[in-house]
Amino acid sequence: MDCLFCKIVDGEVPSTKVYEDEYVYCFKDIDPIAPIHYLVIPKAHISGASEITEENSGLVAKVFEAAAKIAKAEGIENGFRIITNCGEDAGQTVKHLHFHLLAGVKMGWGKESVNAVE
Ligand code: AMP
Ligand code: ZN
């Protein structure tokens, strides 16, 4: 399967690792939109949030456990935001489930957060 994030997990494509355990890999986003912008992903390939099932949802819990650990380890004390884009309208560009962990700036919340393009 030609999946960029599977290749990052396998070390075939380089990344800046932040955290790794048996189920989860976390690395720096190559094009950050916040002072701290990490991607937290399950190592196993799931194409996106619409493909989460009873069988694989335990991996999502592992991702969130890892995110809490990462926030503590990286000294993120003022809060963070976790986002997953799924499908075309949300602008998902990489079809391997990933959670953006954003921090280091006071973020707005409201209609403008959606950043509608049309
Ligand atoms: P999304 O648009 O939600 O699918 O997010 C994909 C994210 O992957 C974007 O924020 C990209 O900047 C990021 N990205 C793409 N290629 C790489 C890469 N090789 N290493 C790190 N981040 C990447
Ligand atoms: Zn993949």
Image (tube, rainbow, N blue to C red):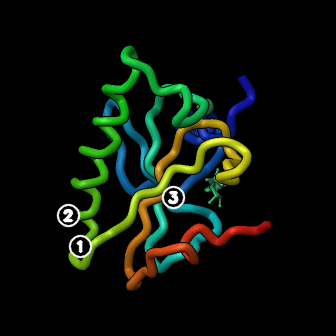
Specify the quadrant of the image occupied by residue 42. top left
Front residue (pair 53, 60): 53
Q: CA distance from mark 2 to mark 3?
A: 18 Å
Q: Can you identify the residue that label 1 sits on?
A: 75
- Check disc 1 and give the amino acid type: Gly
Q: Can you identify the residue that label 3 sits on?
A: 16
Residue 16: x percent and y percent? 51, 58
Q: Residue at x 47, y 27 (%)?
A: 52
- CB of residue at label 2: within 8 Å of ligand 1? no
Q: Can you identify the residue that label 2 sits on?
A: 72
* Secondary element at image label 2: helix
Task: Classify residue 38 as left or right of residue 69.
Answer: right
Residue 99 in the image: above or below residue 72: above
Farthest residue toward the bottom? 106
- Circles 1, 2 touching at the beta carbon (< 8 Å): yes
* Secondary element at image label 1: loop
Q: CA distance from mark 1 to mark 2?
A: 5 Å
Residue 98: x percent and y percent? 51, 45
